[in-house]
Amino acid sequence: MSKVYVSHNNIISSLGFTSEAVVEKISNEVSGLQRIDDKSILPEPFYTSLISTEDLQENFNKRNPKGAYTRLEQMMITSLSSVIDASNIEINDRVGLIISTTKGNIDALDANNPFHKDRAYLSELGNQVKDFFHFKNDAIVVSNACVSGILAVAIAKRYIQQGTYDHVFITSGDVITEFILSGFNSFQALSSEPCKPYDANRTGINIGEVAASVLVTKDADALAKEAVTILGEGSCNDANHISGPSRTGEGLYRSMQSAFTQANISAAEVDFISAHGTATMFNDEMEAIAFNRMDLSTVPLNSLKGYFGHSLGASGLVETIVGMHALKNNTLYKSLGFETSGVTKPINVITETTKKNINRFLKTASGFGGCNTAILFQKTN
Amino acid sequence: MNTNYHIKSYCSIKNNQVSLNGSVVYKDEEESFSPFIKAAYKDQNTKYPKFFKMDKLSKLAFLAADVLLKNENLNLEEENNIAIVFSNKASSLDTDRKHQESIQNKESYFPSPAVFVYTLPNICIGEISIKYKLYSENSFFIFENFNATHLLTYSNSLLSSNKADQVLCGWVEFDGEDNYEAFLYLVSTEGTITNSKQDIIKLYNT
């Protein structure tokens, strides 16, 4: 099997419009979360991270758009543009496009939204992005709850190894909408303060807004400095409950087993874990159990939700990108919001941003429907 | 492309009719989707009370999978490494519209977790995984139309990399009472139909 790499990348978020700018903020422990009190979105105040509309429009307009684009399309196109520019790859029939989102243009369903309701079809979102860049192949839209962003990377690798594509561009994102917030709030999953993954006093999720894009390629030439090799991946179901994680972390455990088997490395060879860490009671506890079952309890671990919140379809991808930069910068980034362990199994949460020579990391995510994904990455340079 | 894989069985639910391997197993002339799927569930002796809590997309996908997998006589005491790879056009829009209605007017604002959880297309995969104890690879894709090439590539990838022993593939679309369709097929090393684009399209169109 040919090696597959994750190379050029971009993040658009409240912490900046390039991966480097965002990682710089993370290294300074700056959070992009803010308190919003807007009854038109949610009856109670909530914490979120929002992309600056002014900056988004300024950056998007530089791309000379013709026609009207939704906020999410603007986010995805702006983010993907910079990755396509950096990659310098001709868009031909050997180049694939994957779009990762949970809800896409769901705001188009709102009676007060200026776009036609049909814009909420995810295939339409795929077509908008495809046509903007003149991709030769139709977009593959991945909508697999909160693992979509990281699963998209596994799917890109599988497509390349099947010989369908040489390169795959992935863009991912979700917008902050009343639709999503009201739903998570009905589950009583939203925190009224900045989220505290794995902490004893955690009180739930913050939802955040991010667009993230990467190039996945088999071409070892012209890789980005922070490029990583995909060593192994797996995506397994809990077969337990549609809205709650497995008490034994079954699906996550099996996803990790699948990734480690394919990578042919041991738990001791992983330098850090970029975990899911949504800061709900059940999710964080489930992860701690699964990591213990994999003998990963001493491996340094962070959740980046304290910086962006949970960015749904983008979360797995944005966290992968930060992990790639962590390897390049030889730095373990602090898991923001954590003080005292609030899970029943030992885990090694990173409490201080630390310089360390590191080569490999494990990225995990879990979501509704019992889905889980794990991928192992290794530094290329 | 690997040609060692075969389509072992296939099932479709459309036009008020349930078919397994090309033979009609349940038919209902009169009714729209909701009474039809309930009657089909009873006729097929599914006996799974959770069915009634599911949204329409999940009911459709679940019943199609149940009709197909029941016929496989799986040993449920052992693990069956059957991956699930589903696709459609409308994602979970039918339930999305329901959730949107519950929040559209502030006077009647009442979002419900029992509805919201189904605003993700992959929930139907979770439902099937729970019933059949499938701790396996699973993914939901959105395309404008039935995409045999994609399902072929992805199932070949899962089988050839030993991620799965068999793959339950298909199209499960629910976009209103009159616009629904499920077509599922099981890719395996056994069977007589080749897992090829041509044969997948032929089965889909029958």
Image (cartoon, grey):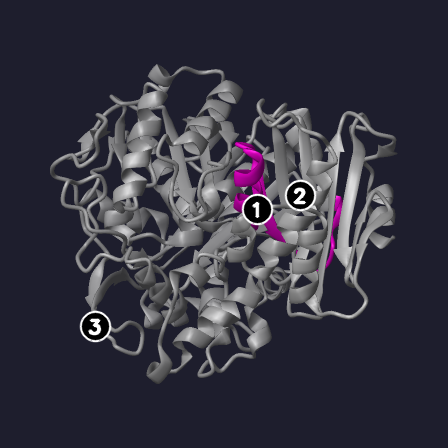
Q: Between tags 1 and 3, which lies in front?
A: 1
Looking at the image, which is closer to me, B38 or A311?
A: B38
Q: Between tags 2 and 1, which lies in front?
A: 1
A260 over B102 or under it: above or below: above
Asked if the residue at tag 3 contacts the one at tag 2, i.e. Cβ–Cβ closer than 8 Å, the answer is no
Helix, strand or loop for disc 3: loop
Residue A73 is labelled as none
Residue B48 is labelled as 1
Residue A94 seen in the figure: no
Q: Residue A312: x and y, percent?
A: 40, 53
**Residue at numbered disc 3:** A37
Looking at the image, which is closer to me, B99 or A353?
A: B99
Residue B192 seen in the figure: yes
Specify start and end residues of the magenta stretch as a single range.
B124-149
Q: Between tags 2 and 3, which lies in front?
A: 2
Position of A159 with respect to B105 (left or right) is right
What's the residue type where badge 1 is placed? Tyr
Residue B66 is labelled as 2
Question: Gap between marks 2 and 3, in whole Å?
Answer: 46 Å
Could you say which quadrant of the image residue B173 lies in?
Answer: bottom right
Position of B137 with respect to B106 (left or right) is right
Q: Residue B28: x and y, percent?
A: 79, 63
Asked if the residue at tag 1 contacts the one at tag 2, i.e. Cβ–Cβ closer than 8 Å, the answer is yes
Looking at the image, which is closer to me, A203 or B102?
A: B102
